[in-house]
Amino acid sequence: MAKKPSAKTKSIKTNQEELLSFYKDMLLIRRFEEKAGQLYGMGQIAGFCHLYIGQEAVVVGVRHAMQEGDQMITSYRDHGHMLACDMEPRGVMAELTGRIGGYSHGKGGSMHMFSVEKNFYGGHGIVGAQVPIGAGLGFANKYLDNGAVSLAFFGDGAANQGQVYETFNMAELWDLPVVFVVENNQYAMGTSVERSSAETELFKRGLSFGIEGVQVDGMNVLAVREASKKAIAHARSGKGPMILEMKTYRYRGHSMSDPAKYRTRDEVKEVRGERDPIDAVKNRLVDEGWADNDSLKAIDKEIKAIVSDAADFALESSEPDPSELYTDVLLEA
Amino acid sequence: MAIDIQMPALSPTMEEGTLAKWLVKEGDVIVSGDILAEIETDKATMEVESIDEGVVGKILIAEGSDNVKVGAVILQLLEDGEDVSALTPASAPPAVKVETPTLQSDAPAPAPGPVMTKPTPPEASIPSNVKMVEVTVRDALRDAMAEEMRRDPHVFVMGEEVAEYQGAYKVTRGLLDEFGSKRVVDTPITEHGFAGIGVGAAMGGLRPIIEFMTFNFAMQAIDHIINSAAKTLYMSGGQMRCPIVFRGPNGAASRVGAQHSQDYSSWYAHVPGLKVVAPYDAADAKGLLKAAIRDPNPVVFLEHELLYGETFEVPDMDDFLIPIGKAKVRREGSDVTIVSHSRMVGRALEAADILAADGINAEVIDLRTLRPLDTETVINSVKKTNRLVCAEEGWGQHGVGAEISAVVTAEAFDYLDAPPTRVHQVDVPLPYAANLEALSLPGVEDVVKAAKAVCYKD
């Protein structure tokens, strides 16, 4: 029931159009997050800000396996997920700077953004809380018989929260159309999986509930996409949930205020140098003859322009009007 | 001597029940552990197990008998060597006096004859031609859910024992039969998890009613009630709705100890983004629960176990709704305002009767909703009476009475002829022993005393 990744993920079939689109999506997240980090350093973004750099292949691969109407929900490391859901970079960045142009009018911040239109259900700041909520979306899908699947993302840290297992139990008991995506980036803040988890292979965590789990190379966008397709099809067919453990890595600290003393610089350097998900796609694009230096540079320029436009917007957008303080607490009955 | 087997109590609040079925007949040999009979109340069914050995001598209460008093002898068991001649007529009063709840032990015995409290009509908007029917709070809550489930297919109820068991307190009785297991969903014992699933289902377009067996267990789920349900609309800039009702019994039951006896009124009433309702009678329970289910916001609906079995008049009409956020003057008076909610309203009304006999005319306000709080009704009353007593079942510190007192002091200071006074549970975890429990909980006499104190009488 639980599977480790196969060795031959490098040769997964793809085509020029698809791979270029993966490349652009991942690059947008990377450049966006680099800009967010920069704005944080300039004091334009405050509070908690958790960057997704290094993990881009996970959400992009999953997103490309989803269908229209499927929902996504995740934790507070959520900027990449929103961009992958086609939410506007301007609206996300303006929320980071706490401006009226942000998705939550500046009232949510980095960890709390939503888009009903794009089926993105947040953006949750309490570790693990999004997991039962994600299963609840699955519950609604089944109740409404709308054929949609809910994708509930959480990290290796949340994988030790009790409510995750309460959810596994009910999701399997009721065959809910939900796929649990564990983004195992090896560190829950400063605590490595080895120091926090009796069973470090997180794809096995659903075994006692009868939930099939698969370990996936989360640095390989094509492997992520393939595994996600199967898991989503499984959930959509009425067979209940699946767990995908994405082995990934974050290059930056847990949040902007984390000096990351719990791991060596060499460790980060090694992953960056040898397993970077964006470099891997770039190399394949070149190897296949689907892109050359000039076309890649053009893409880079295009992405940089989007990000710099988002940053300009986020800095120019005004602070929320003081009247916003009292709105959106309750709806009129 | 023959052994008298008595009608057992299923719970500390049970006074009588139905002897549904005998599983033994006269002459049967019984060993310890044998099941003798099945008994039922409106809440539950239980088997009566023998702890003695012997031969069934005489069955004294026929199968199917209703209203069998707890403690009544239902069967006599012959011990080894005895014959039927050993049977003596069972004594009419039970050998063991079964203690009924002591919560009202400080209240005077209910006066026989006409009740002094003038019943106020449940709601001004009820047309005069509408008939009133007697309904328990339990059935009023069930009717509210059933009516809303008939009206809107998105409404479903989820919780522990809500379906096949028919509700731990029988509030969901009959719903499974009418609506099926898709809409009446039994959960595992996993409050944190199913509260979160409910929140997700609400965000996904449904209208969940999440039943907690009691609100004591909702502490496991309070993160979802507050962080996930109450705050999301605001954090999403008004995009993400969460129309959900969290309901169940709240506050002290009877003799169940500290962990099962907490009043969470002020906990939830503290939180912006929630609506918090705590009804007293059956009409309010029904009208407010229907309004809560239709409300687009998360609503915490605090019921009271000790009110479930109480009967009140409910208007027999379709679509009987009571707006959330409106207090109700349950008794008009001119000398002192008593503000309360949930079960404490009953004690405030009893206290008002006693005070009336002493020449003090008390006005009793039932808050009904704790958030949004109808401070206008309270302030207007205090402007008339110039005196305030806040009575609640929970602890005083940072309680509902503290809030009401602060609001009245700030907004009607010049009208006050005495400092606002609070009546509440004493500042300890609720004890188990009957006498200590009674000492801990606020009763009618406490309300009377406080009202007299602010009126500077005796």
Image: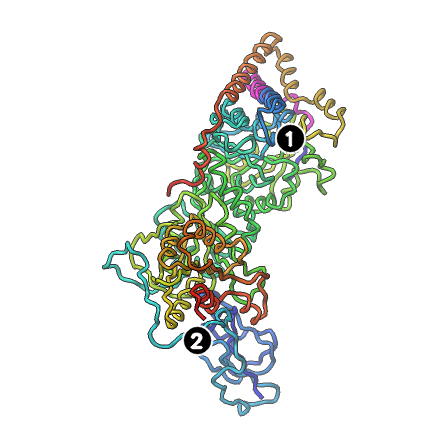
Identify the coloring: rainbow
Specify the quadrant that holds the C terminus of chain A.
top left
Instruction: Tell which of B436 and B56 is nearer to you.
Output: B436
Chain where mark 2 sits: B
Bin the neighbour count of mark 1 within 10 Å (Cα to Cα): few under 14, some 14-19, many 20 and up: some
The reply, left or right, for residue A74 in relation to residue A187 is left
How many numbered discs sit on the rendered protein?
2
Instruction: Name the quarter where the N terminus of chain A is drawn.
Output: top right
Residue at numbered disc 2? B109
- Observer-nearest residue: B150 or A82? A82
Going by the numbered disc 2, the residue's amino acid type is Ala
> Crowding near pointer 2: few (<14 within 10 Å), some, many (20+)?
few
Please tell me whether the stretch drawn in magenta is mainly helix, strand or loop.
Answer: helix
Percent coordinates x, y for residue B84 in the rendering: 53, 89
Q: Nearer the viewer, mark 1 or mark 2?
A: 2
Name the residue rendered at 71%, 36% in the picture.
A191
